[in-house]
Amino acid sequence: MARRTALIILCALIGACGFHLQGATKLSPALSVTYVEAEDTHTEFHRSLLDAFDAAGVRVATERDQATTVVSIQKDETGQRVLSVSAQNTPREYEVYYTVIFAVNVGDKILLAPQTVTLTRDYSFDERALLAKGREEELLRAALADDIVGIVMRRLASL
C-alpha cells in the first residue's frame, strides 16, 4: 500500500513540474513542404535531418519548385584531430568534430541567415583495440550528427 501511494505521489510531482517526454518537434506550417538542398545527400547529418522532418510531419520535396521552404546545407563536414600523443609520438587521444552550416529560405525571403553549428567529442585511442576504436569513432560521428539535427530542428521550430 505504501509503495502504491509513493508511486502515485511521484507521478503527481513529475506531472506538476512540467516534465514531458520529448516528442517530435512542432514546426511552422510554412515548413510543411520543404526541399533540402545539399551537395552530399549521403552524410549522417542529411539522413538524420530527413528522419527528423519525417517525424515532425514535414513532407520533403524532391524538386525545389515543389517546396514552400528550402533548407540549404552549405557545409556538412566531419573529421578528427589528434589531441594528445604519447612519449613514443603515437596518438593517445582524438577529437571528432562535426560542422554544419545551413540557411532557410521561403521563396526570395531569407528566414534564417546562414548558421554554423559545430560539435566535438573526444575519445582515447588504443592501437591494441583498433577495430573497436574505429567503431567508437563512427558512433561518435552519428551521435554528433543527431545532436546537430536536434539543434537545427529547435531553430526551425522557433521560426
Image: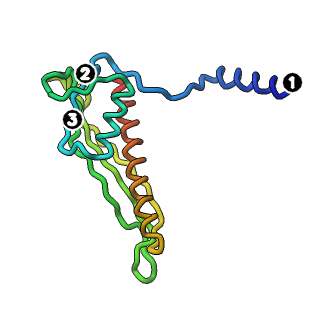
> Mark 2 is on which residue type?
Val
Decide: few, some or many residues near mark 2? Use Cα within 10 Å; few <14, some 14-19, many ≥20. Answer: some
Rendered location of residue 139, percent (x, y): 42, 53
Q: Quadrant of residue 79?
A: bottom left
The label shown at residue 33 is: 2
Q: Residue drawn at (31%, 23%), measured in percent from left and top?
A: 58
**Which of disc 3 and disc 2 is earlier in sequence?**
2
Residues at marks 1 and 2, CA–CA distance in whole angstroms: 53 Å
Q: Residue drawn at (23%, 45%), measured in percent from left and top?
A: 75
Rendered location of residue 95, percent (x, y): 40, 60
Q: Residue drawn at (31%, 16%), measured in percent from left and top?
A: 29
Decide: few, some or many residues near mark 1? Use Cα within 10 Å; few <14, some 14-19, many ≥20. Answer: few
The label shown at residue 147 is: none
Which secondary structure lies at badge 2? strand
Asked if residue 141 is positioned above or below residue 125 in the image, the reply reads above
Residues at marks 1 and 3, CA–CA distance in whole angstroms: 57 Å
Placement of the C terminus among the 4 image quadrants: top left
The residue labelled by disc 3 is 72
> Mark 1 is on which residue type?
Met
In the picture provided, is 14 more to the left or to the right than 73?
Answer: right
View extreme (bottom): residue: 88
Which secondary structure lies at badge 3? strand
> Mark 3 is on which residue type?
Ser
Asked if residue 48 is positioned above or below residue 4 in the image, the reply reads below
Rendered location of residue 94, percent (x, y): 41, 64
